[in-house]
Amino acid sequence: MTVGYDRPLYILPFDHRGSFQTKLFGWKGALSPEQTAEIADTKQVVYEGFKKALAGGVPENKAGILVDEQFGAAILRDAKKHGYNTSCPAEKSGQDEFDFEYGADFGKHIEAMDPNFCKVLVRYNPEGDAALNRTQAARLKKLSDYLHSHNRLFMFELLVPAEKAQLDKVGGDKKKYDLDVRPGLMVQTIHQLQDAGVEADVWKIEGLDRQDDCKKVVAAAHRGGREKVGCIILGRGEDDKKVREWLTTAAHVPGFIGFAVGRTSFWDPLVDWRGKKISREAAAAEIARRYREWVDIFEKARAS
């Protein structure tokens, strides 16, 4: 089985569900139809920004969106109609343990939304709870097998949260953990998941500060004849400066094919729009500007 996707991929992700509901809107618990519609409309602003960026010169064949079915079904349908590259998440939002948003019906929902990529966000630490890791890996293999038997692409967003003992070793310094500990754990995780039969076409990777670590992650993704598997860097809601650094570092490494930067692109413009500080049009334009900036940074670094 050949897995992989190695063409440029510049994603604007806005598949956030729990954080949108609680942090942007301040709503807890089950949503009313009106609340759901309001969140869906806010996501339309991000999509309007994406379309503006395409109109402003972002190459359509490299661009893509990642949005959820719950608030973004209409967006996914419209994007499909326009031939845009779409990705849709399969995981329950905001959980420490990976599980399917729609349980055993996950396949039906994937077929209904028909995305180019099915994406999962998974928190997995290879030195963490072994039973939890096995449970997650078994579910992920099920999804991986399903996607590849249905000619669909699998995007895997890997988060490696620190175990207490790992943080203690670096004196509780999260930055030091990110710099010196997490890169090695990511490589271990990719190996463990591959060995468990989980075959990602694209690995969505938390920002790395050193090119050398980017190279090691690519080597892990490419292990055992998986040369076509791509890696993209994610923004993790960091500030502009940090995102620029991560994009530049990753772009210099062959095997990193792009990025997925969400909150840094859309959060402030949406907050300002909801606070009536700027118009809807201005919010979409600012989202477009930021997204286009990431594309320019990545392409410029890649060319150099």
Image (spheres, rainbow, N blue to C red):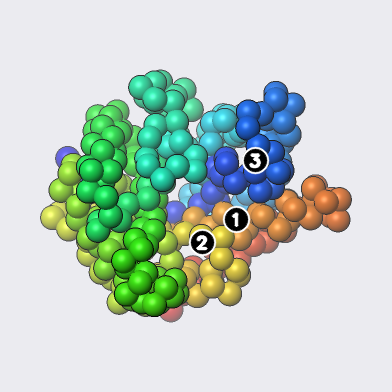
Labelled pair 2, 1 in contact (Cβ < 8 Å): yes
Query: Is any atom of residue 265 visible in this view?
Result: yes
Q: Residue at x 37, y 42 (%)?
A: 97
Labelled pair 3, 1 in contact (Cβ < 8 Å): no
Around disc 1, counting alpha carbons within 10 Å, would you say few (fewer than 14), some (14 to 19), or many (20 or more)?
A: many
Quarter of image, res 303: bottom left
> Which is nearer the N-term, disc 2 or disc 1?
2
Tell me: residue 173, above or below residue 261.
below
To which residue does mark 3 refer? 21
Q: Residue at x 56, y 65 (%)?
A: 238
In the picture, measured across the screen, residue 58 lies left or right of residue 227, that is right
Three-letter amino acid code of the residue under disc 1: Arg
Residue 53, how many percent across, how many down? 64, 54
Residue 285, how many percent across, how many down? 74, 55
- Real-space Cα separation, disc 2 to disc 1, in angstroms: 8 Å
Which label lies toward us, 3 or 1?
A: 3
- Real-space Cα separation, disc 2 to disc 3, in angstroms: 20 Å
Quarter of image, res 171: bottom left
To which residue does mark 2 refer? 235
